[in-house]
Each structure stands twice: as structure tokens, then as C-alpha cells.
Image (spheres, helix red, strand yellow):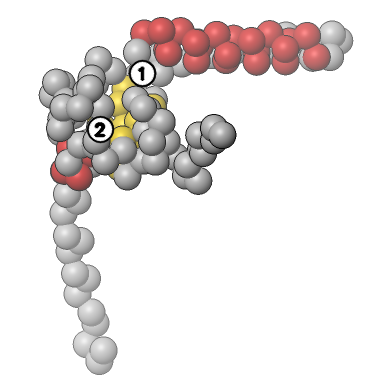
Amino acid sequence: MTTEPVAPDGPACTLCGAPAVVHWQRRLTPTEVGAAQAIEQDRRDQADLLADPQKPPALWPPLPDCADWTRIVHGCMVHAISRDAAALVHQATCTAPGVGLPGCDCEPEAAPADEPEPVAAELPAGW
């Protein structure tokens, strides 16, 4: 008697499909950017087809360059990276999860700088 593999209840590891214990973000690869732009172009084409022909055609802005877009990567216990590394955005070429390696081979983007403390307002007399 054989049993079917059970899919995890939550997210699965990007590499092996086991239940994920950590996730992080990476930039899109050129192929993923092209696919995202193709989806947007298809959406615009469909909108143009459905548009009222008695009105002027839509003036679309340039396609997004996807520079700020990220993709979520999940890692299981075997393919996880550290919490500190997971808090950063990784490059598109990042190999994490890296075939059992406990890290990645890219230089993640620096974390955003802390916002300065707001200056306390001077309260008027009588407060």
C-alpha cells in the first residue's frame, strides 16, 4: 500500500517542497521581469479592446521596469537562511536556498536606515 505525499498546510520550500520555516525576498530575474511586463502589456491590450471606440484611445505610461518588485522565497529547515539574512532583500541571482548550504552567495541590499526620533514639540505654558 502506497500513500500519496501530503502537501504542507502553509507555504512550501521553494527548493524541495517541504513545509517552510522562513521566507525572504529577492529581486526579479530578467526572465521574471519580462513575464511581468508581458502580463501588464496583455492587460493593456485587453483594456484597449474593451474600450469605447467613440472615445480617444488610452495613453498608457511606459511599462514598469520592475526595479522595485520582489519575489518571495521560502525555505524549510534544511534550506533555511538566518533571520538576519532573511530580513534583507537579496539579488535576483541569489542561490539561497542553496542545495543544503546554510546561506547564499549574493550581497543582500543594505537594510533601510532607522528613521530619526521626532523632535518633541514645546508645549505652551499651562500644560
Rate crowding at label 1 as few (under 14), some (14 to 19) or many (20 or more) other CA atoms within 10 Å. Answer: many
Q: Is residue 10 left or right of residue 47?
A: left
Outermost residue toward the right in this view = 54
Determine whether the residue tagged by mark 2 lies in a helix, strand or loop.
Answer: loop
Q: Which residue is mark 1?
A: 28
Q: Is residue 111 visible?
A: no
Residue type at mark 1: give it. Answer: Leu
Q: Quadrant of the N terminus?
A: top right
112 or 20: which is nearer to us? Answer: 20
- Give coordinates of residue 102: x percent, y percent: 15, 32
Q: Is residue 86 left or right of residue 7?
A: left
17 or 3: which is nearer to us? Answer: 3
Residue at the (25%, 15%) spot, across then down: 93
**Residue 100 lies in quadrant:** top left
Q: Quadrant of the C terminus?
A: bottom left
Q: Is residue 113 left or right of residue 49?
A: left
Residue 79: numbered disc? 2
Rate crowding at label 2 as few (under 14), some (14 to 19) or many (20 or more) other CA atoms within 10 Å. Answer: many
- Give coordinates of residue 47: x percent, y percent: 72, 15
Determine whether the residue tagged by mark 1 lies in a helix, strand or loop.
Answer: loop
Residue at the (46%, 7%) spot, across then down: 34
124 or 75: which is nearer to us? Answer: 75
Residue at the (31%, 38%) spot, across then down: 76
Outermost residue toward the bottom in this view = 126
- Give coordinates of residue 119: x percent, y percent: 17, 64
Residue at the (54%, 14%) spot, across then down: 61
Residue type at mark 2: give it. Answer: His
- Give coordinates of residue 79: x percent, y percent: 25, 32
